[in-house]
Amino acid sequence: MTAEKSLPLWTPAFGLLCCAQFFGSAQHALLQPTFPLYITSLGGTPIEVGFVLACFAVTSVVFRPLIGGWADRWSEPRVLTCGLLVLSAAVLLCFVPFVEVTMLANGLRGIGWAALSAGGYSLLALSAPPQRRGEASGYYSGVQASGTILLPAVALWLIDAPFGGFNVVFLVAVGLAAIGAGAGAILSTHAPQPAHDRRSVPSGPWWREILNVLDREIILASILSFASHVSFPAVASFLVLYARQISIDNLGWFFVASGTTSLLARPLLGKVSDRIGRRRALLACFILQAVALTSLAYASNLAGLIIPGMLYMVGLAMASSTTLAIAMEQAKPERRGRAMATFSVALPLSNGVGALLCGGLVQWLGFFWMYIAAAVFACGGLLITIANRAYLK
C-alpha cells in the first residue's frame, strides 16, 4: 500500500486531462443560468425551460454507450477532443432566436458532453494510482466544479452589461470549449496506454452499442450518482428564476460562494472518503443535501440562498468524488470505456429528469414545493445508501 501511495498523481497527462475538463465544464457552468433566462426572454414557460435542459440529457444518455465503446477501441483522448469540438460548434445554433433551435443546440451539446465524459472518466481510471482513486476523483470533480465559482456570475453580468447580451455569452461559450479541445489534442501525446489490446475489445453493430446501456458492475455507483445529482437543476438553473420571483438581487454572489465551496471541498472530501469509507461519506452527502434544499424553500434574502447553497455543494462534492471512486474500483480494465460511460450516464440523466421534474413542479405547484420535493429526492438517496450498506464499505 505504501508503494501505491508513492506513485505520482499530478503527471502531465493528469494535468492536461484536468485542463481539458475544466474548459468543457466551464462552458456548461456558463450556460446553466443562461438558458432559463434566454428561453423565458423568448416567451418560453418554465416547463419549456425544462425541455431545453432535458434535450441535453437525452442525447448524452442515448449516445454514451456507443461513444464509450469507441473510446475502448480507438483512443480516449481523441474521443474527449472530439466531444469538446462538438460542444463548441453546437452553441453556434443558439444565435438563432427560437426555442426549438435552442433545444436542437442543447441536444447536440449532449453528444459532445457524452464524448467528453466517456473519454475523461476512462483516462482518469487509467491514470489514477489505485490507492489514490478517492483523492484523484476529488481533484477531478473539483476541476469539473471550479467553473461554477465565477462562470455563472460572469454569464449574468454579461447578459445585463451594456455591451453584452445573450449572444456575447454564447460567443464566450464557443471559445471555452475550443480552448479545451486544444488541451485535449496535446493530451493525446501524453496519455497512458491501456494494458489490454484495443483490437481484442468486442464490438457489434452501432445500434446494439446504443441499446446496451448498462454495465452491471457499476450499476450501484450509477444509481447513487443519479440520486445525488437529480436535485442539482433546482440549485444550478431554476434558482435564478426563484431569486427574481422573490426580488433578490446580486445573485452572482450565490454562485461565487457555492462554487468556491465546491472547489475547495472536492479534493479534501475525496481524501476523506478514502479514510472513512464510501458508505459514511454518502450518508453525510444526502443528509446535507436534504437540509440545504429544505432551507432554500424558506429563503427570503440573499444570505438565505447562499448558506444552503454552500451546504448543498459540500454534500454534492462528497457524493461526486465518492461515487466516482466506487465506479473506478468496480470497472473492468478491458471494458473501462463502456463501464465509465455507464457511470457517466447518471449525471446527464439526473440533470434531465431533474430539470423536467423541477420545471413541472414550479409551473404547477410553485418554487416552495419544488424545493421540498427536491429534499425528498435526497432522502431517497439516503435510503438507497442504507439499504446497500453490505456493498458499501
Image: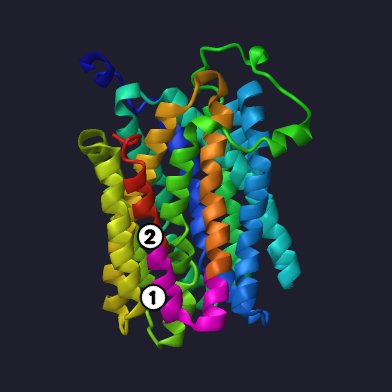
Which amino acid type corresponds to the residue marked 2 in the rendered image? Answer: Ala
Secondary-structure class at tag 2:
helix
Q: Would you say the magenta stretch is mainly helix, strand or loop? A: helix
The answer to whether residue 237 is left or right of residue 199 is left
| Residue 180: mark in rendering | none
Residue 165 higher or lower than 248, as above or below = above
Numbered label tally: 2
Q: Is residue 164 visible?
A: no
Q: Amino acid at mark 1?
A: Leu
Which of these two is toward me, 255 or 215? 215
Residue 317 visible in the displayed image: yes
User: What separation in Å lies between label 1 and label 2 (alpha carbons)?
Assistant: 24 Å
Dots 1, 2 in contact, CB < 8 A: no
The residue segment tinted magenta is 358-376
Q: In front here: 208 or 79?
A: 208
Residue located beneath label 2 in the image: 378
Residue displayed at 56% across by 51% down: 348
State the mark number for residue 251.
1
Which dot, 1 or 2, sits closer to the camera?
Answer: 2
Local SS, label 1:
loop
Quarter placement of the C terminus: top left
Residue 171 position in % (x across, y down): 61, 60
Q: Residue at x 32, y 55 (%)?
A: 286
Would residue 178 be counted in the magenta stretch? no
At label 1, counting other C-alpha atoms closer than 10 Å, the crowd grade (few under 14, some 14-19, many 20 or more) is some
Looking at the picture, how far across and down is residue 305, in whole percent?
32, 74
- Residue 110: x and y in percent read 64, 51
How far across and how far down the image is residue 85, in percent? 65, 43
* Residue displayed at 21% across by 38% down: 276
Q: Quadrant of the N terminus?
A: top left
Q: Earlier in the sequence, mark 1 or mark 2?
A: 1
- Label 2 environment density (alpha carbons within 10 Å; few <14, some 14–19, many ≥20): many
